[in-house]
Image (cartoon, rainbow, N blue to C red):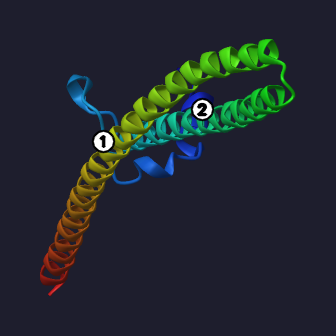
Amino acid sequence: MSIFTRVAAFFRPKDPRRKHDGGTSSGGQLTLSDARGKQQAAVQKMRRGVADVSVSRQRLDLQAEDLQKAMDKLAGQAQKSRSEGDETSAQSAMNRHLIMGGQLADLVSQRDALAEQETMLISALTQLQARVSGFNVSVETLTATQKAAAANQAIAQALHDFDADH
């Protein structure tokens, strides 16, 4: 490594998340900021998953509403055909209505499954956020303890230097 690259590395801006970490730990273990970053990424991924499931459920709700409107229209059409005496047209409309009813039942069961999955994911997300919050409190406690120890050491060194001068 040349002298220039060493000097450049010394003056290169540091990652602010690593300010209180001791650098890369030995044995391939995560530093506190790396662990925090991974936990935040996991929370974000969970939130995206919950949002995706919620959007899918809402789409199914809209499809079910549209299908219900089409079924109502077919029922009205069948009623009108019957009142006009066109039994064949009324029977055809009722058959389509029956098929759409099966499709609607399938949509509703899919929506209910997604709603259940969404509830489960929200519960898991809440638990994950609580664990991450607890970890963050532990990290802050460790950081405060480390700062206090450094301050005590600086005070002890200053007192030692003062006593040595007198």
Image position of 3 (left or right of 87): left
Left or right of 87 in this view: 149: left
* First of labels 1, 2 by sequence position: 2
Residue 82 position within the rendered picture, expressed as x and y whole percent measured from the top left:
78, 27
Q: Which mark is residue 94?
A: none
Question: Mark 2 highlights which residue?
Answer: 60
SS class, disc 1: helix
Task: Give left or right: position of 1 versus 37.
Answer: right
Where is residue 13? Give x, y as percent.
58, 46
Q: Secondary structure at mark 2?
A: helix
92 over 51 or under it: above or below: above
Of badges 1 and 2, nearer the viewer stands 2
Residue position marked by numbered label 1 in the rendering: 124
Task: Count every numbered label the image shows and give the total.
Answer: 2
Real-space Cα distance between discs 1 and 2? 23 Å
> What kind of residue is marked 2?
Leu
Q: Is residue 64 left or right of residue 149?
A: right
